[in-house]
Image (tube, rainbow, N blue to C red):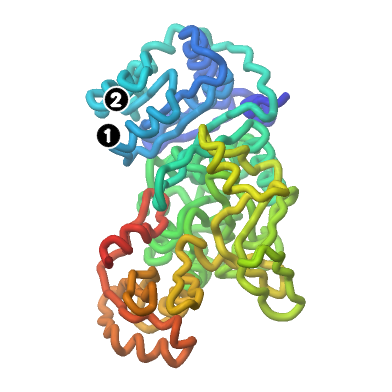
Amino acid sequence: MSNLYQILEARFPKAPETCAIETEDGRYYTFDDLRAGSAKIANWLTSLGIARGSRVAAQVEKSVEAVMLYLGALRAGMVFLPLNTAYRESEISYFLKDAEPAVVVCSPGNLAWIEPIAQACGCATVKTLGESVDGTLIDAARECSPRFKTVASRPDELAAILYTSGTTGRSKGAMLSHRNLASNALTLKKYWRWQEGDVLLHALPIFHVHGLFVALHGALINGSKMLWLPKFDADQIIRLLPRATVMMGVPTFYVRLAADDRLNPRLVSRMRLFISGSAPLLTETFAAFHAKTGHVILERYGMSETIMLTSNPVEAERRAGTVGFPLPGVSVRLVGDDGRLIPKRRSGESAIGGVQVRGPNVFSGYWRMPEKTKEEFTGDGWFKTGDMGKWDAQGYLHLVGRNKDLIITGGYNVYPKEIEMLIDDLPGVEESAVVGVAHPDFGEAVTAVVVARPGATLDPQSMIAEIKTRIANYKVPKRIVVVESLPRNAMGKVQKNLLREQLA
């Protein structure tokens, strides 16, 4: 049994009428509904006569039927290609030309511009899927059988392709196999102590690793009910928290909840676990949430290419500003600029190095980019994540930034995360982002972009003077710019490439 769907389904509750998903508008979907719905779509896909391994691209809003589309593609032996709902014409054109999907499914409102692009890329089948059980995909699958014998995939066969955000160049399609996804789901089920009776509050998008492969797989493989929200809505979250035991979110979720006067220990008395990822969680948010609820947020670390790699523990200490330990079966090492391994230290922190990983969760490479794939793997098979990190004395991993974010000023290396953490602790600062901007003398000048807390007034020159008393002069920002907000992508990551362009 190697097909990811079979591995998930084998752990569905024995009573098929058990509720799997409850939507915001009060609809209930049982596990049997997921079986039947995905079978109908698998039968429809098979009826098209397309080859096994064909790509099925989906740019649709979050719905239970979108989950059925994903599961149906797995069952039919196809490769699922989820696309961010924010992508527009030029981006969609690139992805469809690169992936050459046999089927494209889009939101009804986008059909007029997506269909011509798909046809120009050689895709003959374009269907729509709306948020309210509507669309031509629903019409096409309605008459198909609710039973389907799931294709017996090999462990190394592709299950999905996820395109990276492309903030530093051409987007790359990370190829993820059934083994990659299944191994990670099984590991997280055990490591995060998923329990019988757990209920997941799901408010994440499902075009991304976090919402699709971590949250959704986690609930399905545990046979757990999901309380399903189309997006983060503080009022709805507050309403549903008393009925949930597990919640996964990006840091923005927790910032907003911690600022909500309705959040209190009684509201979350049934909650077992709050998990944060997809972007760094500020220590301040970590502390504020704990003060309001008594709960310690669990932060973890993963990538499109690897799913989850490390995690703070469930039962031992969860440390603010760290992403915990390597997951069982996952190996993590730090490598210096000279290629030498950076050892852990029994006292104090290790030196900073590039994070490299390997394990059954690590992807096989980038879609139709053999040279890029070769470049991103070491000769002995470790994937170079592009992240920089250090170990503390207890073995927790701290991420200090991306190697592409590394600032080289006057010949010295500066890691933005170190400066950001210092600035974030200054009075009146809500958050910050540090980037390198071209400089005639230094090569790059350390530049900070800062958001003030509501009601606070920041004086950049006073801030620079204070920073000079705390760190080496070459790390001190040459300039601090105060803005209303930082640009972020759909998963809450600060888009430093946009900041560099604005500051250039």
Relative image position of residue 363 (x, y in whole percent): 61, 40
Which residue shows up at 45% across the image and 64% down it?
405
Q: Nearer the viewer, residue 406 or 62?
A: 406
Which residue shows up at 42% across the image and 42% down it?
171
Q: Which mark is residue 89?
A: 1
Which class describes the residues within 10 Å of circle 2: few (<14), some (14-19), or many (20+)?
some
Q: Is residue 380 left or right of residue 488?
A: right
Which residue shows up at 32% across the image and 39% down it?
87
Res. 288 in view? no
Decide: is 435 above or below 477: above
User: Mark 1: which amino acid?
Assistant: Glu
Q: Is residue 439 left or right of residue 251?
A: left
Q: Nearer the viewer, residue 8 or 123?
A: 123
Hey, which quadrant is residue 388 in on the image? Answer: bottom right
Cβ atoms at labels 1 and 2 below 8 Å apart? yes
Relative image position of residue 254 (x, y in whole percent): 44, 60
Decide: is 336 above or below 241: below
Q: Is residue 377 left or right of residue 283?
A: right
Relative image position of residue 439 (x, y in whole percent): 33, 74
Q: Nearer the viewer, residue 201 or 143?
A: 143
Hey, which quadrant is residue 122 in on the image? Answer: top left
User: Mark 2: which amino acid?
Assistant: Ile
Q: What quarter of the picture does the C terminus occupy?
A: bottom left
Hey, which quadrant is residue 124 in on the image? Answer: top left
Outermost residue, right side: 346
Name the residue that disc number 2 marks.
117
